[in-house]
């Protein structure tokens, strides 16, 4: 049934016949059925009003109309039908006296006209066929021109048409680029008002005039600095091509504001310099996790040359110290937050393991897809070792290597918290050595220090790995027994300690015998916090000394 404006690809040609004379209408219908290789579907109306009503229905391939209708005549009929059926060619049927009107109709946009009274069906068929064909060509040309005009109007690039004397055309982007509010502010300006130096030579040469300054045509594209109409400067790329306008040479000029690109190029050069000269190692991988770039600091830290790692997976740096769960958590945070910061143990090319402080970040494209991973890291092995030495000195006794008072309190606090949560029990043993001062006085402090070192080892041998043996200072020691099963567990350990310390100590050929007095406090029987338990154990220890030494007493 219905078809496109051309009628191509359809079995029937849809015709709207607008004719108030029944005889003329019958003749047209008859001629359309004679000697035709294609069928015609004719819709006949007698008034302009009825014809216009058909515009809301299926499209017609051609409109045949008389100019003298009951409710319209002449060019008014033509104008109304052209407006109502813009995609269908209009063929006018006119009487002999109306040939001038027919030609006027063609000038107004009709495809053709026929003088009424003809009896040749082929004439009608050819007229309709050519009208449809010419209409299709005209429509395609019109649509092409409209697309071209639209492309120019919406182009993000400034497009101007210039003669050697004035700006003839400027699109909205040109208005924005040169900083004007109205098109008229650019039209008529001399090219020298917008361009200067080599850029002006380029435009004038394209417009058919030799370069004003050099006397010769410059290249057709240059980068330069231009000035907006408000006085601001910007970086630009200017391209000019010769065209014809109104049969005269002109220049089609495209101006691209490349200020941001130039800034990006300068930023890239700066970033490249930073990448090459920074003291921190940098590594860039692609979306496939293969290394695409490293800086000189990376080579210094890892021992790998760039050529040895490019295209490789960063796993070649792995130390093997971290479990799979560590990397899984790291990648989960990296993908969620876009970055990760922490410490990682890695391996140098020579096999040496070191610790690095690292920051990993994601680079995504405009669609949000990850395109690169950037790692920045520094070797903090020395810093880490020094921190560990400082922490060790702050937490351990320098002579015996046992936890000191500060670490004792921390571990006792944690053990109490655990016992409270689990409704468990723990014991605290407070030890004071018997006969240590005479050893110092008789053999000197060097022997006394050796005695304390060996004694510490004996104390460690009396407890579990989960227990804590600490030196408070001098000859005072504390043992913390977490997770006790029974109340007598502490007494068993105390008895073991007493017996262990009764054995003679052989120190550089000197045999020394000492003992110890021990006070025991239990949680929760003798206290619920550190101070209460240590105080109770201390008091029990003094009672043990007063009752004969080398023994233990439960608080």
Image (cartoon, rainbow, N blue to C red):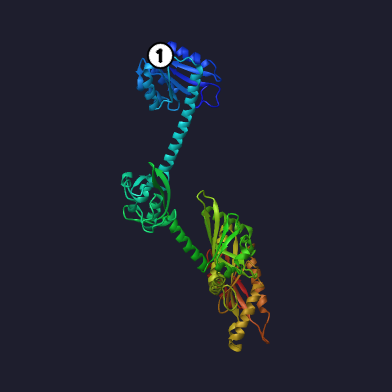
Give the residue at the far bottom of this rendering.
Answer: 442
Tell me the residue at 57%/77% (across/down). Answer: 398
Q: Could you tell me if residue 27 is visible in this image?
A: yes
The foreground one among 174 and 476 is 174
Q: Is residue 271 above or below residue 371?
A: below
The foreground one among 28 and 484 is 28
Q: What secondary structure is found at the residue carrying circle 1?
A: loop
Number of numbered callouts drawn? 1
Image location (x, y in percent) of residue 540? 57, 72
Image location (x, y in percent) of residue 403? 57, 72
Image location (x, y in percent) of residue 470? 58, 73
The foreground one among 351 and 304 is 304
Q: Is residue 462 above or below residue 153?
A: below
Q: Is residue 207 above or below residue 485?
A: above
* Quarter of the C terminus within the rendering: bottom right
Q: Report the residue marked by disc 1.
A: 20
Q: Could you tell me if residue 318 is visible in this image?
A: no
Image location (x, y in percent) of residue 290? 61, 58
Give the residue at the far top of this rendering.
Answer: 23
Tell me the residue at 33%/44% (across/down). Answer: 183
Crowd band around label 1 with a 10 angstrom C-alpha radius: few (<14), some (14–19), many (20+): some
Relative side of 170 to 13, left or right: left
Relative side of 164 to 400, left or right: left
């Amino acid at each position: 049934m219905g078809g496109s404006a051309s009628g191509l690809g359809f079995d029937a040609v849809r015709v709207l016949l607008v004719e108030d004379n029944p005889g003329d209408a019958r003749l047209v219908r008859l001629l359309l059925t004679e000697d035709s290789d294609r069928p015609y579907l004719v819709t006949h109306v007698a008034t302009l009003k009825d014809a216009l009503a058909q515009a809301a229905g299926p499209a017609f391939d051609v409109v045949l109309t008389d100019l003298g209708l009951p409710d319209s005549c002449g060019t008014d009929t033509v104008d109304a039908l052209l407006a109502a059926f813009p995609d269908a060619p209009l063929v006018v049927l006119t009487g002999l006296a109306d040939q001038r009107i027919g030609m006027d109709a063609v000038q107004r946009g009709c495809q053709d006209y026929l003088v009424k009274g003809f009896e040749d069906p082929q004439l009608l068929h050819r007229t309709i066929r050519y009208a449809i064909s010419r209409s299709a060509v005209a429509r395609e040309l019109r649509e092409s021109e409209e697309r071209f005009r639209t492309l120019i109007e919406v182009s993000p690039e400034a497009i101007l048409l210039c003669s050697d004397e004035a700006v003839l055309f400027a699109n909205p982007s040109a208005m924005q680029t040169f900083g004007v509010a109205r098109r008229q502010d650019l039209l008529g300006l001399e090219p020298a008002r917008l361009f200067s130096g080599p850029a002006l030579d380029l435009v004038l040469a394209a417009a058919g005039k030799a370069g004003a300054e050099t006397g010769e045509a410059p290249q057709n594209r240059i980068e330069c600095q231009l000035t907006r109409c408000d006085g601001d400067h910007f970086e630009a790329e200017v391209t000019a091509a010769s065209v014809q306008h109104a049969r005269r040479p002109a220049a089609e000029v495209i101006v691209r504001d490349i200020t941001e690109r130039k800034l990006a190029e300068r930023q890239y050069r700066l970033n490249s310099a930073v990448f090459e000269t920074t003291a921190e190692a940098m590594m860039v991988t692609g979306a496939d996790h293969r290394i695409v770039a490293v800086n000189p600091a990376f080579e210094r830290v890892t021992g790998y040359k760039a050529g040895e790692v490019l295209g490789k997976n960063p796993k070649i740096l792995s130390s093997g110290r971290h479990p799979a769960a560590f990397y899984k958590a790291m990648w989960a945070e990296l993908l969620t937050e876009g970055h990760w910061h922490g410490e990682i143990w890695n391996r140098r090319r020579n096999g040496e393991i070191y610790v690095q402080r690292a920051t990993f970040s994601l680079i995504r494209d405009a669609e949000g897809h990850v395109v690169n991973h950037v790692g920045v890291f520094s070797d903090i092995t020395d810093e880490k070792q020094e921190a560990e030495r400082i922490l060790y000195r702050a937490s351990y006794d320098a002579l015996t290597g046992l936890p000191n008072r500060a670490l004792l309190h921390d571990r006792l606090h944690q053990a109490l918290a655990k016992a409270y949560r689990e409704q468990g029990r723990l014991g605290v043993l407070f030890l004071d050595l018997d006969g240590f001062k005479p050893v110092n006085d008789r053999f000197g402090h060097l022997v006394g220090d050796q005695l304390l070192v060996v004694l510490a080892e004996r104390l460690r041998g009396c407890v579990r790995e989960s227990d804590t043996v600490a030196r408070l200072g001098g000859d005072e020691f504390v043992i913390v027994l977490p997770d006790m099963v029974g109340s007598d567990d502490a007494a068993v350990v105390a008895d073991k300690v007493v017996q262990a310390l009764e054995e003679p100590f052989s120190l550089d050929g000197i045999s020394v015998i000492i003992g110890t007095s021990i006070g025991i406090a239990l949680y929760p029987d003798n206290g619920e916090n550190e101070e209460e338990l240590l105080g109770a154990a201390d008091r029990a220890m003094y009672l043990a000394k007063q009752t004969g030494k080398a023994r233990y007493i439960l608080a």
